[in-house]
Amino acid sequence: MDRDRLRSEVKDLLVTGLRLQVPSTDIQDDVPIFGEGLGLDSIDALELVVLVEEQFRVSIPDEEVGRKALASVNALVDFIIAERPA
Amino acid sequence: MSERAPVGVTGIGVVSPFGWEPDAFWTGLVSGASALRPAERFSTLAPGRLVGEVPARAVGEIARSSVGRRMDWASQMAVGACRAALADAGLDAAALPAERTSLALGSAYGNLQETATFLDRLFTRGSGNPLVFPNLVFNAPLAYASIELGIRGETAMFSMLEASGEVAIGWGIDAVASGRAALCLAGGVDELGMVLHRVLEEGRRLSPGVPRPFDRHADGMAAGEGAAVLVLERVADARARGARVYATVSAVPAFAVPAPVHGWSSDAVALRAGLAASLADSPAVFVSACGDLPRDRLEARVFAAGVRPVVVTAIRGTVGEFGAAGALAAAAAARAVSEGVLPPTLGIATPLGGLDVVTGAARSMPLRGGLVPGLARGGICHPLKFEAT
Amino acid sequence: MPGGIAITGLGALSALGRDTAELTAGLRLGRDGIGPLTLFAHQGRCATAAEAAHVPAGPWGLPRATVRRLSRPDRLAIAAAAEACTQAGLDADARAAAAVLAGATTGGMLETEEAYRRWRAGETRRLRTSRVLGTSLASSGAAISQALGIFGPQETMATACSSSALAIARAGDLVRRGVVPAAVAVGTDALCRLTFAGFDALQALDPERCRPFDRHRRGLTLGEGAAALVVEDADHARARGAEVRALLLGWGTATDAHHPTAPRPDGEGAMAALRAALAMAGLPADAVDYVNAHGTGTPQNDAVEMSVLRAVLGTRLARVPVSSSKSQFGHTLGAAGALEAVVTVLALTHGILPPTLGVREPDEAWADVDVVAEPGRRAALATAITSSYGFGGHNVTLVLGRGDAR
């Protein structure tokens, strides 16, 4: 399923792109990406925006959009599906 | 232990994107002109990025010693600023009291370009270039300046990110006030290179256009480079030799506040509390704001107009942002206090509310004091206070 | 200052161990921390180094995202500072007002150079901010401040090999003037390809191991580590029941103004620093009982250093034991000043003379000098000096005196 594949791609990106010490399979779909969940901070946020834009060819123009799109793995998957070029 | 005597600034030397000539920096700053131009020295990712590049200069014009011919760029700017400062102070570089002359320089990243050159060869050829390595040592500017000027007293090099220049000047004030040195050259230098610029660009820290410190829609900084050095002497000694004293300078107790190790603090309350006494004496503040939102917003809260009137101005919108820009701010503060003129902050279209920022033209006003707060990432605050004599 | 300046806490990580207890044992037993270079591949004459026995992972109460970005010297520095503050018994209030003076040379270069290499080689498309955030030499001081709640003045000095000796001098100065009640002086450094390749290119490394003061010495051995000393007013320390482990009696700094890497052959700068330190301590040269030398093992340094000692100590030099601890844990660059000051304090406290490993035959120019070769020698020491001479000619000497411990 496209959605499942996308979900695991997003998790892999989080782990390799931000050098997290957890296996990507441990990342839960609905848990917040920032704050307590994965322990990411604002510097990670900036990097993640760039990585997501590059890999999935979407645009995250500002903080507002970014906050919603990066709220959780599911939120990010939804965003990518909605925004990526056809 | 000698008594601590008042310390004054008797000479100022600045090598900036406005050029190497004496007064180029101050004249440019108060004129309201911008020193930022499209990058020439290297290609930027986005075309037309504005940067503050210092114009090239033949090393032979700066170096007199034989080892000095191999100076790296940062060292060249530092030595140039030292020479200009001494000339401005009416001191003969060849006749300094060697063992009683001190030197202190600060830099955020040192000579990164030489580092990149060295690493390129190491990674492609498997070995380093022995001629380049001496220039990589972080204190190369300190060593070269001490060699060029024959300075044999205490010397110190500092690395404190955005407060690098302030920390060095603070150390210099102590060296002179305590009587350990008859005079101290103190300031900072940072260079702009392709690698650092690329990191900033990819990290989305740079404005696509003109940087707008304290603007509601600030969208990033512009990178710059330069060096500024102050000649510090006891006021009594300066008067005795008939030297002009721009202002007295003192190191306000430095401190840190809770903050992310690699980022800007959000504890404006603690910063304001730590700076309260200095603000009472020095209502003009030379802030570090540069168009980078986390920093600008923090400073806007710290220096917001409150019970005490505070007027602020940011020079990094004019010359660009770099670690040692605080040394240039210190140079500007000394001049400002001396002449009663505050340079304008460039780029503001829609000002953030709650702040009295000098915009448009330079503002003439009698100044009894000026403060350089010396904020840096990691919660650092290393203030310098300049007072009219 | 009536009661003097006390050193009340120590911390140390090096090839000899992960704390001062292991370091002390290493000094007593003459352990050799020099071995094969394993941290990265290197093509050159030399394949040995003194790698740190242990680099802690934290988290020291810091946010996870921050811990991920800490560089190797950051980790070593926090651990050393934490050990020193704990030993000194500094409570939260004391820490909040204390200063951090750090010495470093290359900061997080190990991590940065790798990120740079990969970017230049096209293995990564971007040279990302997070990979180079730990680059700054200042990050160790900031990490210590935030991890341990130390919120007084913070300064990071970088004068090559004398960085942390200068930090100790600065700490002493701030305490002496009453600017802060206590100061943590730290030195830290980690091995990296840049440093290794640079010294190798200058032919400054001994291909096997350094032999300070040996007739056939060929160069230095690089090491890594961190050390910290808590410096405070001695009366203040005793009043709060802290142990005065040693006294910082004096310090002196002077500059060669000669060459970016070579020392002045006549040793004038080093001599000026040594004389100034003794003058501040109010001590004549013959009060010195032990010399912990800069002793890198390069042909030039050792010769200049011995000539300086001879000029200042005169005939007494023949009766003063001299050793180079770089023979045990290598030249730790930014950490050297602090680490060797810790060694000197331990020597004073425990009455042990650290050995100079690798010496087979002292140079004939100092055949009369007691270069401590064998481990296990004991002596009652009251006063000692430790010197550091940084590339670019930045010379620092510290004078240390025995503390209250009996």
Image (tube, rainbow, N blue to C red):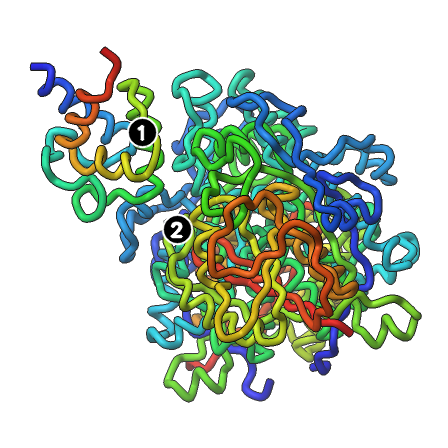
Residue C176, percent from left and from top: 58, 78
Q: Residue at x 61, y 46 (%)?
A: B316
**Discs 1, 2: same chain:** no
Instruction: Tell which of B308 and C102 is nearer to you.
Output: B308
- Residue B37, horizontal then vertical, whole percent: 66, 31
Residue B85 drawn above or below residue B178: above
Q: Which residue is mark 2?
A: C76
Residue position for label 1: A60
Three-letter amino acid code at the position of disc 2: Leu
Near mark 2 (Cα within 10 A), the count class, few <14, some 14-19 or many ≥20, is many
State which quadrant residue A62 falls in: top left
Q: Residue at the top extreme? A: A86
Q: Secondary structure at mark 1?
A: loop
**Spatial separation of the CA atoms under disc 1 and disc 2:** 39 Å
Q: Amino acid at mark 1?
A: Ile
Task: Identify which residue, B195 or C286, lies in the foreground.
Answer: B195
Give x and y (percent) for residue B91: 90, 58
Pointers 1 and 2 in contact (C-beta within 8 Å): no
- What residue do we see at 16% from left, 29% from top? A24
Q: Residue furthest left?
A: A1
